[in-house]
Amino acid sequence: MSQSRQINLSKEGVPIIAIAALAIIFGIGLFVVGFDQGHIFSIAFGEQAFEDLYIHELTHDMRHAAGFPCH
């Protein structure tokens, strides 16, 4: 006994909202890794965050590997 199966393919593509969400996430990630000098943590820690540079120190080597000058 032979059975046949029908396969349905959707050719609608990627939703625009998904592309927009990924672009926003990329932009935030680029800021955090490439340009943040204490700005994000200054919301919680105030002026001390600009001296400690937590995210800068965590992403320091990645910044140089990606070509961002930081000092």
Image (cartoon, helix red, strand yellow):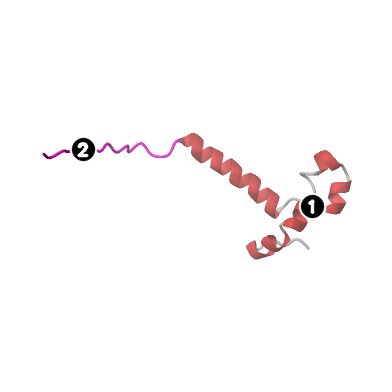
Q: Which residues are magenta?
A: 1-15
Q: Mark 1: which secondary structure?
A: helix
Q: Residue at x 21, y 38 (%)?
A: 5
Mark nearer the N terminus (1 vs 2): 2
Viewer-nearest residue: 68 or 61: 61
Type of the residue with mark 2? Arg
Q: Residue at x 27, y 36 (%)?
A: 8
Answer above or below: position of 15 versus 52. Answer: above
- Main SS, magenta residues: loop
Type of the residue with mark 1? Tyr
**x, y percent for residue 56:** 76, 55
Query: Quick check: 29 left or right of 53?
Result: left
Q: Residue at x 29, y 38 (%)?
A: 9
Q: Which residue is mark 1?
A: 54
**x, y percent for residue 62:** 67, 61
Q: Which residue is mark 2?
A: 5
Cα distance between the residues tagged 1 and 2: 56 Å
Q: Mark 2: which secondary structure?
A: loop
**x, y percent for residue 53:** 81, 53
